Image (cartoon, rainbow, N blue to C red):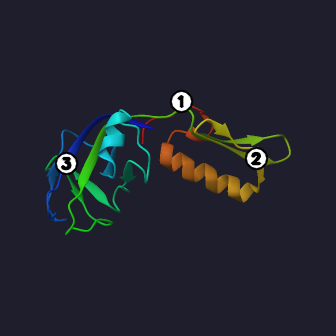
């Protein structure tokens, strides 16, 4: 995925996890910046654990409409300096998707990551329900079978 509209917040030497950090608008994603040079050279390509570390909303960060700001907490060390990437617009990668197919007798999971498509792997009906629910919650609107027609998360 590519972060197409971002801002970088520099926290300095120490960060108060109770403090609100002003943002332009409600972010789509928030991440810690790991390798700024590669992130900028890649024009915002978000590679989790390589160029950025994606933070979980509510677990690691929250947005306040009242303050038009975010609070970042959780997995960070407030004593260490770090930079935060705030993504306002995201372009999904059509090379990454998941789909459940049915050959008439059983459900099968097919996953595509970085353009490589997995073999059709048989799964139990219970597992198919869990996967559908997890991906629909993550992507919304029945995206499990939508291929590249996904909305940003």
Q: Which marked residue is nearer to the observer: mark 1 or mark 3?
A: 3
Quadrant including the N terminus: top left
Q: Tell me which label, 1 or 3, sits earlier in the chain.
A: 3
* For residue 80, side relative to residue 48 (left or right): left
Q: Determine whether the residue tagged by mark 2 lies in a helix, strand or loop.
A: strand
Residue 104, given in percent of the width and then of the height, sits at 84, 41
Write the residue at 15% across / 64% down: 14
Residue at image mark 3? 9
Q: Eyeballing the image, is 3 above or below 51? A: above
Residue 11, given in percent of the width and then of the height, sits at 16, 56
Q: Determine whether the residue tagged by mark 3 lies in a helix, strand or loop.
A: strand
Q: Are marks 1 and 3 in contact (CB under 8 Å)?
A: no
Count residues near mark 1 (Cα–Cα under 10 Å), then give few for <14, some for 14-19, many for 20+.
few
Q: Are marks 2 and 3 in contact (CB under 8 Å)?
A: no
Residue at image mark 1? 149
Residue at image mark 2? 108
Count residues near mark 2 (Cα–Cα under 10 Å), then give few for <14, some for 14-19, many for 20+.
some
* For residue 112, side relative to residue 20 (left or right): right
On residue 94, the disc is: none
Cα distance, mark 1 to mark 2?
Answer: 20 Å
Q: Which marked residue is nearer to the observer: mark 2 or mark 3?
A: 3
């Amino acid at each position: 995925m590519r972060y197409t509209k971002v801002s970088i917040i520099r926290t300095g030497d120490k960060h108060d996890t109770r403090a609100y950090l002003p943002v332009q608008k409600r972010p789509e994603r928030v991440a810690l910046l790991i390798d700024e040079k590669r992130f900028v050279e890649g024009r915002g390509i978000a590679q989790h654990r390589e160029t950025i570390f994606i933070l979980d909303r509510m677990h690691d960060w929250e947005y306040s409409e009242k303050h038009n700001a975010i609070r970042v907490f959780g997995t960070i060390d407030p004593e260490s300096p770090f930079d935060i990437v705030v993504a306002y617009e995201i372009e999904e990668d059509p090379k990454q998707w998941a789909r459940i197919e049915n050959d008439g007798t059983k459900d099968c999971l097919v996953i595509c990551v970085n353009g490589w498509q997995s073999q059709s792997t048989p799964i139990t009906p219970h597992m198919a329900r869990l996967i559908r629910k997890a991906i629909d919650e993550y992507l919304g609107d029945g995206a499990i079978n939508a291929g590249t027609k996904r909305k940003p998360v």
